[in-house]
Amino acid sequence: MTLNWSLVHSSHTNINGNSSEISITPALTGKYIIVFTDSLGANPAWYKAGYLLPCFDNNTIGKVYGRSKFVALRRHTFIKLTDWEFLNYFAFKPVSWLVDIQIKIWSTADYAVYDQDDRVEDRLNEIYSILQN
């Protein structure tokens, strides 16, 4: 089965060593995303681009962050979002040594077909663990 990935975000930001957050509000089509980053001035040996942080704003508390997701440089990083992460926006926190950062995000809902297989395998492993005890 071929998955239908949709490009939902594309940006290029000059950061000049400033590791301030970059706000990202993609129009996601599903809870499965691929994040690609690149940097024109990056050393070919560098591996880390930064972190994708799911977040939302709360009137009482302020900005709230979810669990950060590591994003590799010059590679495609696959991320499965929780329902909460899917419904909110993201901040990208680049590493401080990059001069610029290109971020592309693709999204799909089709991966849920494969995810069902993972859930079945998890349930079988749980049953096996119970039977062993």
Image (spheres, rainbow, N blue to C red):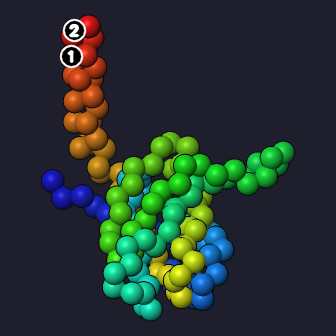
Single out the residue that lies furthest toward the right. 60
Q: Amino acid at mark 1?
A: Tyr
Assess whether mark 1 and mark 2 are in contact (beta carbons under 8 angstroms).
Answer: yes
Left or right of 60 on screen, residue 29:
left
- Circle 2 residue: 131
Q: Position of residue 46 (x, y in %)?
A: 38, 78
Tally the numbered discs.
2
Label 1, residues with CA under 10 Å away: few <14, some 14-19, many ≥20 = few
Q: Please tell me whether mark 2 sits on a helix, a strand or a loop.
A: helix
Among the 4 quarters of the image, the one containing residue 116: top left
Q: Position of residue 24 (x, y in %)?
A: 58, 68
Q: Residue at x 52, y 83 (%)?
A: 98
For the residue pair 35 and 128, the one nearer the viewer reads as: 128
Q: Position of residue 80 (x, y in %)?
A: 39, 49
Q: Residue at x 64, y 81 (%)?
A: 18
For the residue pair 39 and 32, the one nearer the viewer reads as: 39
Q: CA distance from mark 2 to mark 1?
A: 5 Å
Single out the residue that lies furthest toward the left. 1
Q: Please tell me whether mark 1 sits on a helix, a strand or a loop.
A: helix
Q: Residue at x 56, y 84 (%)?
A: 13
Q: Is residue 99 visible?
A: yes
For the residue pair 95 and 39, the one nearer the viewer reads as: 95
Q: Position of residue 127 (x, y in %)?
A: 24, 15
Single out the residue that lies furthest toward the front. 45
Q: Is 68 drawn above or below residue 36 in the view shown?
A: above
Q: Is residue 6 visible?
A: no
Q: Is 118 drawn above or below residue 23 in the view shown?
A: above
Left or right of 74 on screen, residue 92:
right
Q: Amino acid at mark 2?
A: Leu
- Circle 1 residue: 128
Q: Residue at x 32, y 63 (%)?
A: 5
Quarter containing the C terminus? top left
